[in-house]
Image (cartoon, rainbow, N blue to C red):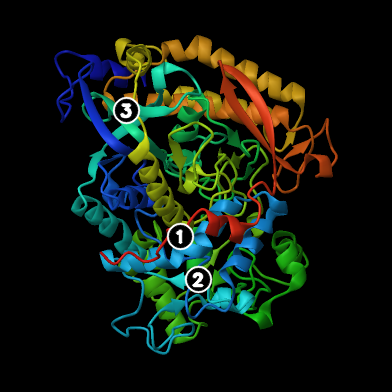
Amino acid sequence: MALFHEFFKQETHPPEWPYPILYDEEQEIDTDVLVIGGGMAGCWAAISAARKGLKVAMVEKSATIRSGAVGPGVDHWCDTPNHPLSKVDPDEWARRLTGSNGGYNCGIGRQIQCREDYDTLLELEKMGGKIRDAEDQWQGAEGRDEETKFMFSPRNNAFHESNVVFRVWGTTFKPALQKECLRLGVSIYDRVMVTSLLNEKGIQGARIVGATGINTRTGEFMVFTSRATVLSTGVPGSIWVFNTELAGISSHQSRALSGDGNAMAWKAGVSLTMMEKSGLLGIGTGYKHKWYGGAGDASYENVQLVDANGKKLPVGNQGWGVNPQYVDRQARAGPWQVIRDGVLKGEYALPFYGDFPGMPEMERNITWGMMLQEESVTKIIVDTYNEAGFDPSKDQLMNYQLIEGASPPQWRAIDIPGTRGSGIMIDWDLKSDVEGLYAAGSQLFATGDTSFAASTGRYAGRKAADYARQADKPDISKDQILREKARVYAPIRRSDGVEWKELHAGIAKTMQYFCSEYKTESLFNLALHSLKDIEENWVPKLYALDPHKLLRSLEDLSILTYAQIVLHASLARKASSRYLDFYRIDYPALDPPEWSKFITVRLENDKVTVGEVPLDYCGNLKANYEANNRDYAGVYTG
């Protein structure tokens, strides 16, 4: 490592950076609505605000055309009960979703999703997103409506008989959204990392009037002023686990997801909730058979799992029943242990396989030729298999997931499907408790999937635009900007010390040691002490040799702040909870009624303030949604 850095510092052989270096140079952008994050939620927020006739700027750390969790694609559009073929009531479905997980859910976001995500989907089609089998390629397939040519998920219908999950061609979505943003005149700033929110007059907790950022290719400093701001960044995927030699960073999430939104909201005085919640990291660890290398995940839908002798397992993919006749109630309650016990008793022979040849031909072709071609990273994997000669009509895929069990308790993650937690506390406008700041998508607590991100982004954009119309001109603080500029550029002022990988690894180890499955107050305090030591003694040694490494260094600082927030929230909840996957040895009572509430944490005068909010604070979902959206007209036709 040392020799590598010495090479980079040699004057005789300096590597040529492909962009001009513009450290300390400053660009100022003034806009009505600022959208931070250009994923699914961010694009929709920008489009929605621009359609109100306002000046909109969207800032994205990567490249908008393929950024965010949905950037590479998505194969399902879930929880969409508000369409003519739905078999459930949208308001009832929203209540059902909100009541799940012990009530630790974002009822406002779920109600918006259930009322507006079909409208959002149809709008997306008008922009160029493909949402139906218009070419009749899959005519006669299970779940396909022959009149509308919509394709509904057979697996979802088998369990819920609801028609609320669409199969879609998600690789078409982000390019269509970016194109619509540009058509509407949205100013897109790609490759810019937002580093802080600006409070009015620089006072923590005061109205948000903009943000600062840095161009990750040139190092140029960016100052955005705005009348309203929508925060729509993602949650971090590598607070507890970090290893660049195994599976990239040993997390299914992108390294670009470093919790920047929550970190900057925290410093601006915004209330966050469910920060104490985490779950076991089940995929992408590098030590285990990845789910996307065998038959797992929703994309594989109806692939039956069999043992080495062709005997059908009682569960499929991630423990869900494949077809009703194969559903074993005991297995669904605890698939890992059931299958492991079966192996030890000789009931099932290893290895296991996804039995593609055993599927009905149409469903096999849809799964392999459509679903896996549309879902995120699986397209390149399918292409690789195809190039190697894999034939799903003849070949099976080996899968060890069901016997590998859960990860060790110290391998944890914030945003595991089914255990999603931390985010900004919002009201019925998706506004935070700090004036001028709105949130959408993964920035909300207890967030959802693609349709949740799209519908809440679309909603937040129009609410932020309405606010911006009547908001006063921003009053920014030059001192706040200068302080942030000094913080951001500190690593490039040094020529040696600690690099970003070392810092990240230290933060992850601290969280593994002191905030894993079982928790106590003393462990939390040890963790805070350790992170404080990193902050005071190692962050001042952090150095970066180029704008890219500066980006990674700044992401580490977001991760560090995020970890500290997790610990403050964990200290505040003095009870255990199965719903939060939160177990305290010193407070073992599981979900006592007096602790069935949201715990909020925020900074006030740089001091941690703890609050509490009832789980049902959003009130009657249907009545409050309608009261706050009397002007909502549904599908955009302009």
Disc 1 target residue:
451
Distance in Å between CA atoms under marks 3 and 2: 39 Å
Secondary element at image label 1: helix
**How far from the left and from the top, in percent, is residue 309?**
62, 77
The quarter of the picture where residue 488 lies is top left
Q: Foreground mark, 2 or 1?
A: 2
Q: Is residue 421 left or right of residue 249?
A: right
Whether tag 2 and tag 1 are in contact, CB under 8 A, the answer is no
| Residue 162 tag number | none
Q: Foreground mark, 1 or 3?
A: 3
| In the foreground, 30 or 566 | 30
Quadrant for the N terminus in the image: top left
Q: Give the amino acid at mark 1.
A: Ser
**How far from the left and from the top, in percent, is residue 599?**
68, 35
Q: Give the amino acid at mark 2.
A: Asn
| Residue 82 tag number | 2
Disc 3 target residue:
473
Q: Residue at x 65, y 56 (%)?
A: 620
| In the foreground, 379 or 556 | 556
